[in-house]
Image (cartoon, grey):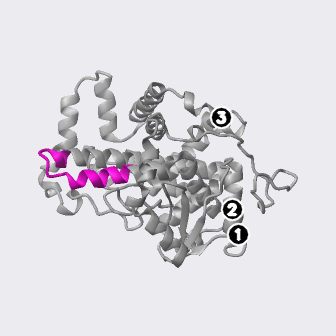
Amino acid sequence: MSDDGHEHNGHGRVPSRQRRRFPGISSRAYEHPADRSALVALRRLSGFDTVFKALSGLLPERSLRLLFLSDSVRVSDQQFAHLNDMLRDACYILDLEKVPPMYVNQDPQPNAMCIGLDEPIIVVTTGLVELLDEEEMRAVVGHEVGHALSGHSVYRTVLLFLTNLALRVAWIPLGNLAVMAIVTALREWFRKSELSADRAGLLVGQDLQASMRGLMKIAGGNHLHEMNVDAFLQQAEEYESGGDLRDSVLKILNVLPRSHPFTTVRAAELKKWAASRDHQRIMDGHYPRRDEDKDTSVGDSFKESAASYASDVKSSKDPLMKLVSDIAGGAGGLGGRVKRGFEGFTSPSSGGASSATDAPPKDDPREDGPARETPPRDEE
C-alpha cells in the first residue's frame, strides 16, 4: 500500500499508520557485520543451497509444514486478520516480493520462528500473540520477515543438517573437538543473526519503545506496569561492566550453549543501533540494494566483521575484554592485574568454584539449540 492507501504487489490491507518503505533494500543494510560476512560467503558458493533444497525431503521440514498445516491456524484475511495485516505490511516495507505463510500454533510459551528451505514459513505461538500489544507484535513480525529476507531460514536449516551429520561421524579421532568447534561457531552466528533480525523488526515497526517493551515482556512477562525501560537497559550495563575476570569467564560459559543473546543485551544492542548513523542513513533512504548483492566482496565483508569485533572489544566494559584490549595495546603491569582478577577462584572467602555456576546452564526452554533435530526457534 502506498501513502494514498492503494494496494501494491499484492500487499493489501495495510494498517493506516504511514511508515517509511525501503524499496529494493538488501538485508546487508541491517545485518550485524558478523552475520553479514557469513551470509555473503555462503551466497557466493554457487549452488550450495540449491543442492540442499533438493535434499529437503531428507530433512524434517516437509513434516513440519504438514504438521503446521494440519494442527495450527493459518493466518489469512479470515483467520487472525490483524496478524495478516502486519505480515503484509512488513513484507511491503522491506519489499519482500512473496508473502510467506504464517501460522499460529497453540503453545503458552511465547515464541516465534522462521524455517524452510524451499520457501520460508513463519510460526508464532498463542503465548506470544497474547503477551504483546499491536506495536510490539509488529516488531516481532518484522523480525521474522527480516529472517526470511536475509535467507536465514535456508542457511540455518542447511547448517543444522551439516551439524547433525557431523554428530553422526563424531567417532572419528578428534571428531568431538571438531563438532564442538562447528557448534560453537554456529551458535555465535545464530546470536548475531538474531541481532540482525531485531534491527529488521525496528525498520518495520519504526517504534523503538515498542521493540523495547516487547523484549522486556519476553524477559519479565505481561507486567509492563511493574517494569521500566531505562532500568531494564541498566541491567545490560551492569551485566557487561560488573564483576571481575571470574564473572567474565562465567558469562562466556553461560552464553555458549545459547542460540540467542540474552534479552537485556538484545535491548541494549538495538538501542545502540537505533542511535547509529547506519540506522539514520537507512531511514533517509540511503541503503544497499539487493540487486548489488552479487557484486559484494567476501573479503570486504570479513574485514568489516573483524573491525566490528575489534571495536566491540575496545569499547567493552567487560573486565576480560578490557584486559584483551590492554594486551593488544601493549599496556604494562598485566601480570598483576590477571592475578588479582582470578585470585578469587582460590581465595577462602569465595569458597571455591560453585558447581551450580561452573556448569553451563541448559538451554532456555524458549530456545532450540543447533544440536536438536528441529530448526532453531526464534525467541522474540
Q: Amino acid at mark 1?
A: His
The CA distance from mark 2 to mark 1 is 6 Å
Specify the quadrant that holds the N terminus.
bottom right
Circle 2: element type:
helix
**Residue 243 at what x, y percent from top left?**
31, 48
The region drawn magenta spans 159-177
Identify the residue under disc 2. 86
In front of the other: 328 or 154: 154
List the residue tagged with mark 1. Answer: 82
Tag 3 residue: 287
Tell me what residue is drawn at x 38 percent, y 34 percent.
313
Q: Mark 1: few, some, or many residues within 10 Å (few <14, many ≥20)?
A: some
Query: Mark 2 or 3 closer to N-term?
Result: 2
CA gap, disc 2 to disc 3? 23 Å
Tell me which numbered mark, 3 or 1, is placed earlier along the sequence: 1
Q: Main secondary structure of the magenta part?
A: helix
Whether the magenta-drawn stretch holds residue 170 is answered as yes
> Where is residue 365 shown, x and y percent of the image?
38, 68
Q: Callout 3: few (<14), some (14-19), or many (20+) C-alpha neighbours within 10 Å? A: many
